[in-house]
Structures are given as C-alpha cells and as structure tokens.
Image (cartoon, rainbow, N blue to C red):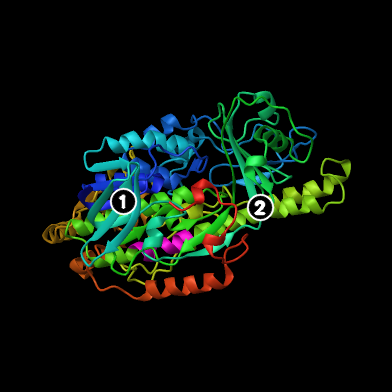
Amino acid sequence: MVVHHQTPVLVVGGGPAGLISALQLSKQGVQCMLVERNLDTTIWPKMDQTNARSMELFNRLGISHGIRKVGVPPEYSFDVTISSGFSEGEEIVRWVSSPLQIVFQWLSENQKLPSVNEWRETIKKENDGSHPREPWQRCSQAIFEAWLKPHIQAQPLIKSFFGLKFVGLTEAESEVTCELVDKSGEKHIVTSKYVIGCDGAGSSVRRAIGKTLIGGPVPGALYLCHFKSHDLSALHRQGQFCHIFFTSGHVLLSIDEKETWTCHTPVPIGTDASAIDPYEAVSKVLGGSGSPVPIKIDEIIVTSAWRPNICIVDEYTTSNKRVFLSGDAAHQNIPTGAYGMNTAVVDSFDIGWKIAAVLGGYGGPALLDAYQAERRPVAQRAIERSGVHWAVHEDIWGWVKEFDKSILSEDAADLKEKIRQHATTHDGENRDRGIELGYRYNDSPIICPDEDGTEQPPYLERSYVPSTWPGARAPHVFLKDGETSIFDIFGQGREFSLVDFSADARYASVFVPVAKQMGIPLKAIHLPNEDHVRKIWERDAVLVRPDDHVAWRATIDGDPKKINVKRVLEVVVGKAAVSSVANAKAKAAADKLKKHGFTGTIGVVDQDKVEMRAAFQSIA
C-alpha cells in the first residue's frame, strides 16, 4: 500500500533547522508537512549556546520565553576558562567581559561573562543600538528539541510525522514528488510545491539533488562522553563555568548547571570508541595535564568518537528553485563560536518568509534566488571563523606538547604567560558580535542600495556597528517610554514594516496605498517624536523586512517625491530583474574555497571518505 500526501511545503528533518522551518512557515500562514526519520528527538550534546540573534528570531516566533524556562537559569554566567587541570593544575585564563567588551584576562574568580540577567540590564541601560533585543541563552540541543517538538505538533498548520524516512525525490517545473518510508516499510509519496532539506550533516536531500560539500575535517579526532553527575566537589574545583579548555587538549562543558556534562578528549584516527572506558575518560579529562581526578558519575548518557568538520555546500538550492537546504545539510562547522545551530536558525527563518511570500502571490522569483545570495556568504564567513577560533586552542595545545617540561612545573611560568597573552590577542570565540549581528546582505537582488552615495559603515568581525545600511539587521532601540522595543512594534508574520519618523507621515502616505495595490502586507509605524531612535536609525524612513533586515531607506535629503515607490516594492519582494552579481560572486567564492579550504582543517576532501564520524554526522 502507498500513502499519498499533498502539502505546499515539505520539511525533511526534525532537528533545529527543520523545527524552525516548520514553525516559521506556520507563523507565516503556510501549511507544511514535517518528516523526521527518528521517532524521538536527539540525545546528542550538540548545540549548547543560543546566540542573541537566534533569540531575537525566537522572540518573533513566540518561543523565546519557553526556551528560557527550560534552559540554564538566567543568573548563571557564560564563563569560559583555560586550565592546566583540576588535580595539580590551575586556572590559567578566564574569559570575562561586559557583553560587548569581552576579553581574556588573568582575573579574580568573581569576574564573569555576563549572565542573561546581567546582559538584559546592560541592554536597557545603554540603549544605543549596539545591543540585541534579546540576550543569549544556554540551552542544550537535546533539551531544545524535546521542548519544541510538542509545540510543533500542536500547530494546526503543521502535519508532523516522526519515524518517516526520506528516500528520494523528483523535481518538476512546478512541484516536487518525494518518496518516504515509515518504520513498518510502508511507502509514502508526498507532492509539494517546495522542499526544505533540514536532514543534517549526512543529508539525503542534499545527495538527492546532487549538491556537494566543500571543506574538510580537523587533523585529529575526539572522543565524547555525555554524562550525569552531582559530584561538584570534582567538577567545580575551580568554580562555576560554562566551558573549560584544558591544556591537555581536553574540553569540559557544563550543560544545565545541575547534573549534565559533556567532555571531549583527543584520540588518534582509527580509535575504537567502544574500547574506551567512559568513566576513566572523564576522570582523565578533569585531570587535564595532571593526574586523573576521581569523580562519581551517576549515568553515562551517550559516547562516541567524532571528527570536527568545516564544510559548505556548493549551492543551497536547485536551478528550478523548488528544493532548498538549511542547517547542517548546507554547512557544518567546529563548535567553537557556536555558529552551527545559530546559523541554521537564520537559514530556516529566512527561507520560510520568502517561500510564504511567493506562495502568497506578492513575492516574485528573485526572493528564492536571494536565499542563496544572502545566506551562503554569511554561513561561509561564520564557519571559517569557527576554524580560526579552533586554531587558537590548537596553538596552545601544541605549545604544551612541545614544552620540554610539564606545564605543572615551576619552570612553566613563561609558557603560561604566553598562553595568557595569546588568548588575550585572539579572543573572538565569544566576542565576535559582528559575525553574529553585523552581517549585511550586500549584492542581494532584493535589497535597494543607497542612492545618495553614503559610504558603507565598516564591517568588523569582533564588534557590531549599528546601522540601517540596506541589507543590515535594523538596530534594536527602546522607545522613549523605556519599555517598548522598536522590534516589538514591527509587523508580524508576513508583514514588512515602514518606520516613518517624519512629522506628517509623508512616507507612509505614499508607500501604504502602493503596497495595498500590489497586495504586499505592510505595516506603517509612525514615530514622529522618537528623536533618540531616529538618530540611531539615520534616516526619516526605513523599510524593514519580516526578518528585521533593512530592505530600503530614504535618502539623506528625505524627499518622498523622488522615490519610485512601486519600483522599490518590486525589488524587495523579488519581482524586479535579478542581478547576476550575487551568483557570480558565489561561484567565485566556491572556486576559491575548493583550492584553499578552511582554517584549522586538513583542506578540501571527499566528505564520504572522512573517518571517525559520529551518528549525528552520518547519512540521514
């Protein structure tokens, strides 16, 4: 028997990318079908930090409060340390900061990376556009998925099927036909207008459409152990922490600040992970460069060998623009910097509103072209940065190995000072707000560039420069009541937002009727008395997309009579002619990457031949 299904959009994969894709489509009023090969959500300890940009988008989706309830409580810090071990060793460096001035320093144990509560206070106090609407949040992917799954299943516009495996697809001009099979072996045929492949690193959707990953793994491999323990006498010997990087190459993560932890230890390529005693492995990790530390472990949740990998797909979509890739199916990275799931969240949010606009009839084909043009350069920059961060730790581990004496000895004072200085100079791992918030969709076919010759503000990986430069994320600012964020009054769902600071709403008066005539959902926001916001936003009128990015802004002289409103709206909804600039740049970037690869890796290799993959990296 064959079961037939029909849906506007099929989402393949029930991890973060798939769950957010489905939820975004639902919020946009689009019916979809979500399929996941597994019956249950992940137990793997992958993502553990949701960055501020993701939390802003989760706020738009109505799930930010729920995630904070199941995540690490808001009073806990995000401290990251470098230590020589918990036995004979010591803390060498502690990563500390105010939210935007994060540095490595040799400091007292009371100085921390900001908690959610501390950052929220700073956001309100400074209110200068340089901060996000929402602080970051610590929440394990295992907890995140388990919480979000029933929320997705409760959405009336989402039909979800867990235990349904993708087998293959056929793409036609106007639809896609997918074959799937359930646990009983029964075949399912799904016909849809679009497919979003969110089925992870070993994506079967990616393989089905013939797209290739460019990149490679780090030189070595790691053994991970995800476990539960209440033995804080062993685990908190150097105080509370989020992550600890030991000089031995071991890494320890606090997952929930209660009982759940993950450790990673370097192993040679070819190591049989099943032969490693996880209890001994944890004890050795805690010892760092010293002797093992005894610890009472309550439960071993999962263990595996795995290979950190950085790669990106050559193309995010098919030439017919019916099948798209999001998340690990499109790009993978080393966990340093927390760019993996956070990049996936923006991917899924982005393709969701664009597909909704096209299905709604007011969006044109350039919207779908823009998905790759906008998201691929951002992802490539972020995952490259993860390699840069990883290389900082590899340098430290290499120096310790090459040192002719122990780092625990009195003779290691100069080495420890070298480590401190190195970490201070190369401190971007939790500092790169430009990567997180400052990217701009330059060369996008659906962005209207400035027409008055204004110079683009600098792009800095280490810090975020607030700007309404077209293509940038609009700056978050509280209105003069001190409570209302400008983000809170943006249009919801499919709506674009025209923010008009003029006294007489002159821009809204010309944009609203044209948008109505074109069938474009547009919310006019008139803020004639918000001088502080206007100063930060730089122009009298700014058009903001459903993803908070600036699509167009008025010229400095601010004459609405000079604006071809229809042309502006045609561009931002993808109905204007598509520029070939973005596609040409994407091809050039892919060609360059094939020659040089990513920082911290062995170069470009055949991904199917990479050894030591974990289950979460295998073919979906």
Secondary structure mostly seen in magenta is: helix
Which residue is denoted by mark 1 in the rendering?
180
Left or right, residue 206 beside residue 193: right
Give the distance between the C-alpha atoms of the residues marked 1 and 2, in whole angstroms: 34 Å
Where is residue 558 drawn, in percent x and y? 27, 64
Query: Relative to 314, does residue 302 appear above or below in the rendering?
Result: above
Which residue is denoted by mark 2 in the rendering?
270
Q: Disc 1 residue type?
A: Leu
Where is residue 259 drawn, in percent x and y? 56, 27
Secondary structure at numbered mark 1? strand
Give the residues in magenta. Answer: 371-380
Left or right, residue 263 beside residue 418: left
Question: Quick one: 94 or 346, which is closer to the camera?
Answer: 346
Where is residue 601 drawn, in percent x and y? 61, 61
Query: Relative to 594, does residue 426 appear above or below in the rendering?
Result: above
Secondary structure at numbered mark 2? loop
Residue located at (24% from left, 52% from top): 190
Question: Quick one: 177 or 564, which is closer to the camera?
Answer: 177
